[in-house]
DNA sequence: ATACAATATACCATTGACAGTATATACTGA
DNA sequence: TCAGTATATACTGTCAATGGTATATTGTAT
């Protein structure tokens, strides 16, 4: 994977947000969809692009597909995520907000969907 | 300037190389052309894109146009340049090589073109 | 077997980035 | 004023990324 591939990837704000979210832990497609407020198709395509690139991996749990960052996370990605999370620009703010939204959403899921994937809700007291 | 604009910019290896070179000091268009081995038109366009973005500034010295990084250099750019300069990937190597090429080229210019711009060759004993 | 939920893919139209050729501009020196 | 050098811009064709609609796939529950 070349640096330019990584930059091309995170040049899309939505893909950057996805990486940022998954950096905090695995998530299902539908949850990413909900947090980013994008259509199912679009989310699925974005994820496919990043999986193709080798940045993401996925596994199935029931009907849910759980995506997570492929390990090891390229240093270039981690460096940029860390930098932006520490920043104060509009985009930085968004990334911080997303982490908060992720936490809340996981709690809701855990309560509402007893069948939600262990790998996503496991940290909370769900399932 | 948004983070995504910056990423889009450095997602092009040539633009990344240009930023990396200018990070070491101002350069004329023709020298950038020579180091990167691209056509005049292409170089001019790349520079225009980055100037438009606010990343570069230019001033004229005789017939030469001298480009330099706009100050302050966005932290996101500096962070990435620093990261890559410390790395060992192919692209990192390229950036390191470019710095060396830059040093050599400036010396040659200084000797061959007594009319070369102060702001470029000033550091060496030219002009 | 059927219906449904979650997700992926195929197909298509639109848009935007990019490369190349030709031409214009700005300056210098004779 | 004219020629030459350095650089920029206009114009055009091409290709890749993107978004949407429809449809397929995979698994679950009845």
Image (cartoon, coloured by chain):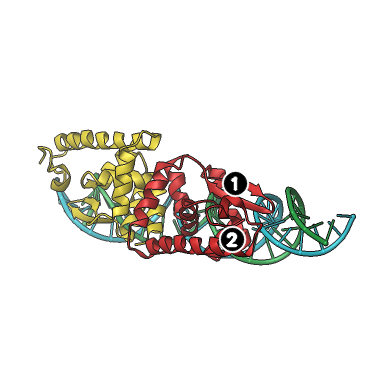
Chain colours: A yellow, B red, C green, D cyan
Task: Look at the numbered disc 2 and give the secondary structure of its residue.
Answer: helix
Residues at marks 2 and 1, common chain?
yes
* Label 1: how many Cα within 10 Å (few below 14, some 14–19, many 20+): some
Left or right: residue A110 versus residue B69 is left
Picture quarter with the C terminus of chain B: bottom right
Left or right: residue D2 versus residue B84 is right
* Label 2: how many Cα within 10 Å (few below 14, some 14–19, many 20+): many
Please give the count of numbered marks on the rendered protein.
Answer: 2
Left or right: residue D26 versus residue D9 is left
The residue that label 2 is drawn on is: B110
Give the camera-side residue of C18 and A123.
C18
Task: Look at the numbered disc 1 and give the secondary structure of its residue.
Answer: strand
Q: CA distance from mark 2 to mark 1?
A: 20 Å
Residue visible at 35% across and 46% down in the picture: A16
Which image quarter: residue A5?
bottom left
Ranked by sequence position, the earlier of labels 2 and 1 is: 1
Residue visible at 31% across and 37% down in the picture: A86
Left or right: residue C24 versus residue D12 is right
Which image quarter: residue A49?
bottom left
Q: Residue furthest front?
A: B125
Residue B11 lies, in percent from the top left, at: 44, 54
The residue that label 1 is drawn on is: B58
Disc 2 sits on a residue from what chain? Answer: B
Tell me if residue B38 can be seen. no
Residue B4 lies, in percent from the top left, at: 43, 45
Give the camera-side residue of B5 and B35.
B35
Residue B1 lies, in percent from the top left, at: 47, 39
């Amino acid at each position: 994977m070349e640096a330019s591939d990584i930059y091309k990837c995170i040049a899309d704000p939505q893909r950057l947000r996805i990486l940022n979210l998954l950096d905090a832990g695995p998530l299902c497609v539908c949850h990413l969809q909900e947090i980013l407020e994008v259509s199912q198709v679009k989310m699925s395509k974005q994820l496919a692009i990043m999986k193709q690139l080798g940045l993401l991996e996925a596994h199935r749990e029931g009907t849910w597909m759980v995506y997570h960052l492929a390990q090891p996370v390229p240093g270039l990605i981690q460096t940029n995520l860390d930098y932006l999370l520490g920043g104060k620009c509009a985009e930085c703010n968004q990334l911080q907000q997303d982490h908060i939204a992720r936490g809340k959403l996981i709690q809701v899921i855990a309560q509402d969907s007893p069948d939600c994937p262990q790998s996503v809700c496991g940290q909370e007291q769900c399932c």
